[in-house]
Amino acid sequence: MSRRLHPSVAGAQPFQLADRDPDAPLFETEEDLDRVEAILSRYPTKRAALLPLLSFAHELHGWISTDDMEKIAGVLELTPAYVWSVASFYTMYNKRPCGRHLIQVCTNISCFLNGATDVLESFLEHTGTREGETSEDGLFTVIEAECLGACGFATAVQINDEYQENVTPGKVPQILAELGKDTGS
Amino acid sequence: MAEGNELISLTIDGIQISVEPGTFVIDAAERAGALVPRYCYHPGIPTRPAQCRVCLVEIEDQPKLQPSCTMTVQEGMVVRTDSEAAQAARQSVIELLLVNHPLDCPICDAAGQCMLQDYALETRQLKSRLNEAKLVQGRDRISDDILYFADRCIICTRCVRFMREVAEDDVLVVVQRGHRSVIDTFPGRDLDHPFQGNIVDVCPVGALVHEDFLFKARFWDMDQAASICPGCSTGCNIAIDVKENQIVRSKPRHNPDVNSYWMCDHGRRHLVMSNRGERIEAPLLRRDGKLVPTGWAEAFAWVAERLREASGGTAVVSPAAANESLFYFRRLLDRLSSSGGIYQLSTGEEATLAGFPKLRLRAERAPNATGAELFGFVRAAELPKTAGQGTVAVLEEPLADHPEDWASDASFFLFLGTRLSPAARNADAVFPTTSFAEMDGSFTNHEGRVQRFHQALQPPGLARPAWLVLARLIAELDRLGTEASAIATPTEAEAAFQAMADGTPEMAGLNWSAIGLKGGLVATTTERATVEAT
Amino acid sequence: MAYPYRHDRETTTILSRHMGEPEARGLKGWLERGGYEGLGKALEMEPAEITEAVKESGLRGRGGAGFPTGIKWSFMPAEPRGPHYLCANADESEPGAFKDREIMRWTPHLLIEGCLIAARAIRAEHVYIYVRGEFFPVIRVLDEAVEEAYEAGYLGERVMGSGWSCDLTVHVGAGAYIAGEETGLMSSLMGGRAEPWMKPPFPAQRGVFDAPTTVNNVETLASVPGIIVNGPSWFRQWGSEKSTGTKLWCCSGHLTKPGNYELELGVPLHEIVHDVCGGPPGGRKVRAVIPGGSSTAFLTGDELDCVTTYEGLLEAGSSLGTASPIVMDESTCLLAAMRRIAQFYAHESCGQCVQCREGTAWIAKILQRIEQGEGALEDLETLYDLCEQLTGRTICVLADSVVFPLRSSLDKFRDEYEAHILRNSCTAT
């Protein structure tokens, strides 16, 4: 991220990205520290910055490790246990690393009515994985998701920070092929 | 009550009562004789999340049932804790808790004192419609001696809130959510807090258990006695659980002026240790250089004979001896025209319960140093390496670290105690006394609160409370001599206490039944001793 | 695919007029479309006047509960003793609903303007927009708009040159339906688990950061600028006495033309399903509709004559909720549909209240067992009883939310349950 973010949105960035570095140092560069400072400036309590900082760590690392939680606890003067309690409540924080492309298939009611179960099956079949597993090439992790808020465009699939809508089982191979080209650097 | 605070009148289950403004309905109901079931609510934990929903009651003019733990009383409120709707809601909570709670009561430490068992019986929720498999979530070790059985947990969060709000160490939390919620610590970081044992006590079911107690005793096989923790000078009120005449655990007993609902882990562990060691079971008299067991009558006669001409000498007491024993020991010393007397106090690190700072594991690791001071004994940094050649009398100080020849050249050495250390073996007479757990008596805590403790165990053999033994010895001396000490020879702790209170200016006004289980304060120089109205 | 599907009620496109126009996203394009006119006007009004206008307009909350917006604002202290906060609830997560994301991704400035007017009315000087985490594409658009608005002086110190300052922060959730419940949202915003709390205290007394707070849905806030610009009676020209204005209808399920449609309140439901959305594909018949998102009661295909006002749908035995009809045609196994809905609530229960934590999961398991052919008729009694047990006894209404569809499906589609239990078959065609 080269652009300096306005504090109003510093804590509100997409945090499930294909490009990430699980080993990147957390809150160490001047730029990152500035952003942490900007986030903190928006809340009357430090604790309120917890989700934004978890999301920030997730944006960099692609998942939340115990090290991340301890670091965030330190910054916000919380206990690591408290941070763990909060992080574990929210489903979007991966508690372990996942594939480069996290594919979340909505199977909630509207998508369910429109064949989402088959779409999920199709993704699993074509990636050769079971739900939650990462494919051998490290590219894909497919999981079932609750309502993604795109019910009129069933089946909705979230792939990292983008939505694919009106997905049918037939479209799955092409989607995966497109993603497969993006293997990162 | 503060002026201007008019009482609030309300009706609970048809009973009209008046309570202070701000009283919660659940507490008002208790005063009206209705014990509303509760899980998440604990009077010693500040927050009331109202999440277990088992305390819902009907309140007239309210469309929905209301949690009685968060609802404050209002003038004219009409509460029904036993209405059909309230009962149905309560039964429903129990049925739902049992959806995932295992029925492993036969191997659960909490069986018999489990609030889920109790309420299941109370609500007649005895038949299950459940056809589904229960979640199996295993057990975790969350500290060096606390185990967490996730399956049994009902997520009342008392333990979480105890650590967060009372211990003020936010290290135990709910993780995950919904029916997958469990209690956990941060990965790799066990609990390590001097007061953490209280989470086991607040657990309404058997989800948190002490490993030390695991599978050790069924609740119904244990006897309980109200006691005082001897671990330090705070004097936490405790209940001692006894099985087959062994202490198996101790739990805090509520006293708002001392320890609230809590106690420290040092105290908990300390007490179970007292089962260790070999006890003296009969009076021992030195004959032909050897300690020989005998009966009490002979022992009193033999010792009195040898003490009648004694005067001066060395006296050592234990700061763990009961007030009554110290009092009678002082009287014995008076009888022998001996003054002074010392005690030694071991010390340790302090630990304060942040959310109830009055409760502190105090540096003085004995329950009755204040009592010892009160009866004229003086704290010595160290006990004398040698005892001198006069009379030596020792009350319950174990002399554990003393040289083997300590007091071996005394003209006469009387030892009253529970165990024979090498130094104690030099005594000419040994009187076996009871431990505090084997007798009724009292301690005076650091702030001068005189608190009663009660007999939990049967003493071994002929061991008797020191005050009883000492009173009998004084009586024997009186019989042999020309003067009488005019001191009662009680056979009951209450009478011993009365004799002590009558004979001790600072305790004037204290009385065994009036101090009850809450204790009474000794007087400072200017005031009378007080017993707070309860 | 073009967005949105247009329909013939052009006159009622208030909120959605500029959806589908990428230029409307930017400040320049938005100003060309009359943007921030309402804010300019509001800045010349007293806070109480703004509240009064919204009260008069009859605008009701669009997040599901339908509480009158102006009245909600009037609960805020008139004389602030400390900070006040406005939270825009953009945690759109009711299954069936996808309207707020459309407002935000096409017309983010409309939301910002609505927030500012509302903040002025309730004397708040900081607005938090709590957006559900999954909406990354929406968040990008919103972020950009907020930065633009700061730069142009619509946000921050001295809003539009007035003496009034107001900050706005975009706050992103991380996957929890219950963060859409107003106290859950505030718990989450304060850095906690999104656990709802007992009311009282009501948010207007003590909300986020212990300060008086108003939580409004995105669509509610987006409706405000129009009311301020055009006056309350303009808004009242649509809808009924008790349900004024227009509403975005999120139509999904078995429909030929699913999508968002802005309609005045009170259009008959069958018109929405059949005329606006073209009914189920392949000419199949409608078997069931959940009119207000998955937390509302089922209507059968024969019950679509009702009018889609707050009161009309209540009368029909359901509710308007988030105005998100989920249509199920005759090929639908209603047991499977209900099981899927129940699984959602079990997954999303925060876990505080026993009824919800254990009850939602138990219901889902019972339905699953029946679906697998291992049900018994007693299960239906148990389910009815659980409906009773999960109603009105918990901190928030998540437990009640599963009861509405469950009880109505048991009442109206008992044949489906019995077919599975007695014959291990299904009534879907």
Image (cartoon, coloured by chain):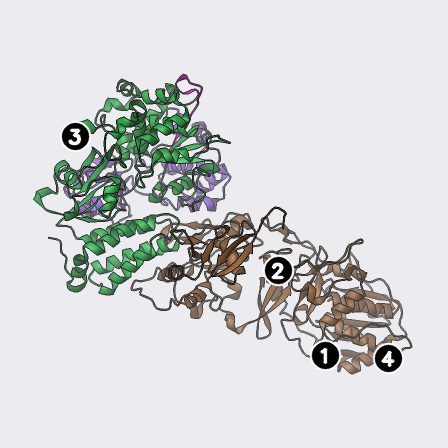
Say how many tags the image has.
4
| Looking at the image, residue B132 lies above or below residue C279 | below
State the residue in front, B60 or C319.
B60
- Chain name for mark 1: B
Q: CA distance from mark 4 to mark 3?
A: 116 Å
Three-letter amino acid code at disc 1? Ala
State the residue in front, C152 or B38.
B38
Q: Earlier in the sequence, mark 1 or mark 4?
A: 1
Q: CA distance from mark 1 to mark 3?
A: 104 Å
Q: Colour of chain A?
A: purple
Three-letter amino acid code at disc 2? Gly
The residue pinned by badge 2 equals: B267
Q: Which residues are magenta?
A: C157-172
The residue pinned by badge 3 equals: C9
Q: Are marks 4 and 3 in contact (CB under 8 Å)?
A: no
Q: Position of residue B389 (x, y in %)?
A: 87, 68
Q: CA distance from mark 2 to mark 4?
A: 43 Å
Three-letter amino acid code at disc 4? Arg
Badge nearest the viewer, 4 or 3: 3
- Chain name for mark 3: C
Dots 1 and 4 on the same chain:
yes
Residue furthest to the left in view is C283
Dots 1 and 3 on the same chain:
no
| Looking at the image, residue A84 lies above or below residue C76 | below
Badge nearest the viewer, 3 or 2: 3
